[in-house]
Amino acid sequence: MSPLRRFLRTPEAVAGAILLAALIAMALSASLLFPGDPQAIAGPPLLPPFQDWSLPLGTDRLGRDVLAELFHGARTSLAVGLAAAAAALVVGAVVGTLAGFAGGLVDEVLMRITDAFQTVPSFLLALAFVSVVGPSLGIVVIAIALGTWTGPARIARAEVLSIRERDYVAGARVIGMHPLAIAFREVLPNALPPVLAMSSVIVAAAILTEAALSFLGLGDPNRVTWGGMIAEGRTVLRTAPFLSIVPGIALVLTVLGVYLAGEGIVETTAVRRGLS
Amino acid sequence: MSGRTEGGAPARHFFQLPRVIVPMTRALTLLRRRLVGSIFVLLIVVVGTFLLLEAAPGDAVDAYIVSTGGDAGMIELLRHRWGLDQSELTRLANYLWALLHLDLGQSVTFSRPIRDVILERLPNTLLLMVSATALSFGLGSALGIYAGARPGSFRDRFLSIGSLALYAVPGFWLGLVLIVVFAVDLRWLPVGGIETLASDKTGLDRAADIATHLVLPVAALGFIYLALYLRMMRAGMAEVWRLDFVLAARAKGLSRRRIVLAHVARNALLPLVTMLGLQSAQMLGGSVVIESVFSVPGLGRLAQEAVAARDTPLLLGIILTSAVLVIVINLLVDIAYAFLDPRVGAGEAGA
């Protein structure tokens, strides 16, 4: 059976893919369906959901359209999640390959640095980084990547250690290729599959970290974020709990979609075939 | 049928409590090796925090002048007195020297030594972390055994999807939902804080009061990680099921329950102990938001207060303390591991 058909026969994976597709559609259509500033006042404050069909999910404390904010928030979550995960995977793969391929002192130094990053709680590190440099989308991405590159680095290193003794690497040495060229052209591509298998977990973690940062008020102040919406709703938690609950459900569904689809892809491609 | 021991006890090679002396020496060797590595790691963390401190706009003098006022001459004088006009390397050396004396500097926000502020908050965070870890590890591994006992069954699929859903829940949001349900609607539990203020409770009354305040934060923090242990246990058991000694146990005619508990689950439990150490850093990070949601006066809430007040030295003091805490927890886990698994460190013990 082809990987795609196996994927389609796994109900969890299909559910995940549908959730992800819905999220991407939300993010892409945000400006089309809700043009203009999602942070602008759209109606009376604290309108409950399902009362007024022009504002299906009601309004928040300041009278902003919750549905519009939700759509625009999907954009931030997706953008930050993907960008931070990509940065973490690239940095991790490069550091892991260098450490594993060079060995010796380089390996020792790089791995102690990896240890140091794993010793500091990644959320605290992100918090400190954003608070020192100032909140903006790019900084939030870097802050999240700072705490997540260590996992891919360790996996890449372990993989490289097993690859570097293979014949084709010896062959590349014999024909006089530069060690860095061997590391990045021959070894790294072959070490990638198990690193990429981690990407769904990393994207999910990045989305959750972004939400937590913006919940604490450290998100980009010019963008709508689900974490920021939850924090906003928290001030009226007793009277209008839906304001915190709705964006939270969006977060849960998003992260769940990423996990399910990611696990589906990993299970159905060759990466972990030996286990099933 | 239950876990009672039969006459000729089956091979308990992994969990048999060994004589204490052998693991003790092994643990010491391990400890020595790990301590050396930890010092390097800690040094990197210190240099890293120093660089962040340097990158922060303004220095201690600016913060001091903002809160007290003063002219340019005063600024010069203070910079000189606090050694801030020296080169960066000298300042790093001064920073390290102060840290060696456990001096984290002065907090401008609290007008007190940072060390004292942190030590005051630390016990609450430890209490929260230990309780949440006990909840997630205990319940998570128990449910994992329940799911892994019959791989592929309905309960297995239900629990693994359920745990995945739980793992997708942001802790701070779960906390808010718990507050809405149990504190606002049902009024069973307090909304936040660590104990009832100005209640003059002592002894057991006070302990019970703190316990009621901790139920919701511990649940919010613990339930997220519960999923992790559940999934690890289940995956570990799936690996062990295929091993020969399980087949041997079956061939011997042992009951399924006995095979699950005494053979499969036992051997799948060890990786979870390692996870306990690795997870401690994540849990400390998670407690930042949970403590903020429930206004628990711990290290995490202090970190948020430091961010709000732009008190960078305090924030970095918290990061250093957390790093030390994580290192100590991992050392403890390593030692526990040496006692649990006779194979660990056996190679080095003879050397």
Image: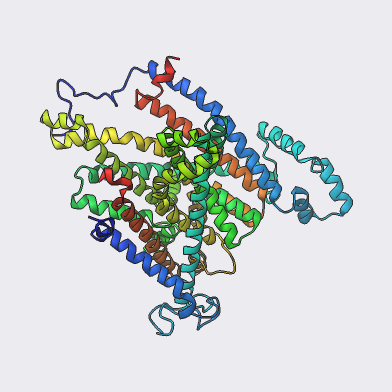
Question: What residue occupies the far front of the structure in this picture?
Answer: A175
Q: Is residue A272 left or right of residue B205?
A: left
> Where B339 falls versus B278 (above or below)?
above
> Where A271 falls versus B25 (above or below)?
below
- Total tally of numbered discs in the picture: 0
> Where B225 falls versus B32 (above or below)?
below
The quarter of the picture where the C terminus of chain B appears is: top left
Q: Is residue B12 visible?
A: yes
Q: Would you identify the image quadrant in which residue B158 lies?
A: bottom left
The residue at the point 53 percent across, 61 percent down is A214
Q: Would you identify the image quadrant in which residue A217 lies?
A: bottom right
Q: Position of residue B132 (x, y in %)?
A: 41, 45
The residue at the point 35 percent across, 65 percent down is A19
> Looking at the image, which is closer to me, A169 or A26?
A169
Q: Position of residue A104 (x, y in %)?
A: 54, 29
> Looking at the image, which is closer to me, B225 or A205?
A205
Q: Is residue B2 left or right of residue A95?
A: left
Q: How is the image coloured?
A: rainbow
Q: Is residue A240 visible?
A: no
> Looking at the image, which is closer to me, A77 or B119?
A77
Q: Position of residue B198 (x, y in %)?
A: 54, 52
The residue at the point 52 percent across, 50 percent down is A123
Q: Position of residue B171 (x, y in %)?
A: 43, 55
The quarter of the picture where the N terminus of chain B appears is: top left
